[in-house]
Image (cartoon, rainbow, N blue to C red):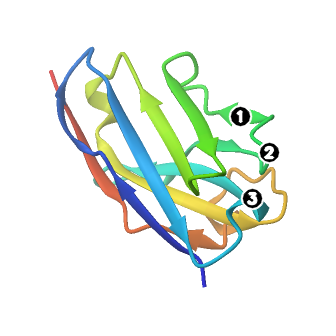
Amino acid sequence: QVRLVESGGGLVQAGGSLRLSCDASGGTFSNLAMGWFRQAPGKEREFVGRITRSGVIIVYADSVKGRFTISRDNAKNTVYLQMTSLKPEDTAVYYCVGNVGATTSRAPVGYDYWGQGTQVTVSS
C-alpha cells in the first residue's frame, strides 16, 4: 500500500514562496504518476498539476501556470511543488496524489493514492 506524506505548508504573505514536499513509501515510486490537488474552504478539489513517472511531462492548471513548478526525485521517492508569487486565492489544503501507471486525468477519481494534505495560507 502506497503512503504519501506532504510537508512544507504554512503561512506566507502574498508574493511569497513555499515549497511542498511529498514523500512516498510502500511502493515503487518510479511506477507512480504523481500530482497535486488543492481544496479551498467551501470549494471542490481542484487539479493543480501532474508529472509523469519519468518526470518528462508536466501539466499545470491555468490558474498556477508560470508560478508553480512540479518536480520529482525518483531516487528520494519524493515529489515537490514549488510555489512562487503566491496569491490569497492560492489558500487551500494541498494534496499529493499518485496513480499506478500513466494517467492524464485532472479529476480526483483518476488517482489511486492521496496524502493527508497540508495547509497553505496566503495572507494579503
Distance of label 3 from label 1 (alpha carbons) = 18 Å
Residue 59 numbered mark, or none: 1
The answer to whether residue 67 is visible is: yes
3 and 2 marks in contact (CB < 8 Å): yes
- The picture quadrant where one finds residue 97 is bottom right
Q: Residues within 10 Å of mark 2 (few under 14, many from 20)?
A: some
Q: Is residue 79 above or below residue 84?
A: below
Question: x%, y% of residue 96?
Answer: 50, 56
Residue 7 place in picture, x, y as percent: 33, 53
Which numbered tag is attached to residue 54? 2
78 lies above or below 86: below
Instruction: Tell whether 59 sits left or right of 19.
Output: right
Query: Which residue occupies the foreground of this view, 63 or 101?
Result: 101
Q: Earlier in the sequence, mark 1 or mark 2?
A: 2
Q: Quadrant of the N terminus?
A: bottom right
The reply to whether dot 1 and dot 2 touch (C-beta < 8 Å) is no
- Identify the image quadrant of residue 2: bottom right
Mark pair 1, 2: CA separation: 13 Å
SS type, badge 3 = helix
Q: Position of residue 84 (x, y in %)?
A: 39, 20
Name the residue rendered at 56%, 16% in the picture: 66
Within the image, what quadrant is residue 120 found in?
top left
The mark that comes first in sequence, 3 or 1, is 3
Left or right, residue 25 beside residue 115: right
Q: Residues within 10 Å of mark 1 (few under 14, many from 20)?
A: some
Mark 3 highlights which residue? Answer: 30
Q: Amino acid at mark 2?
A: Ser
Q: Secondary structure at mark 1?
A: strand
N-terminal label among 3 and 2: 3
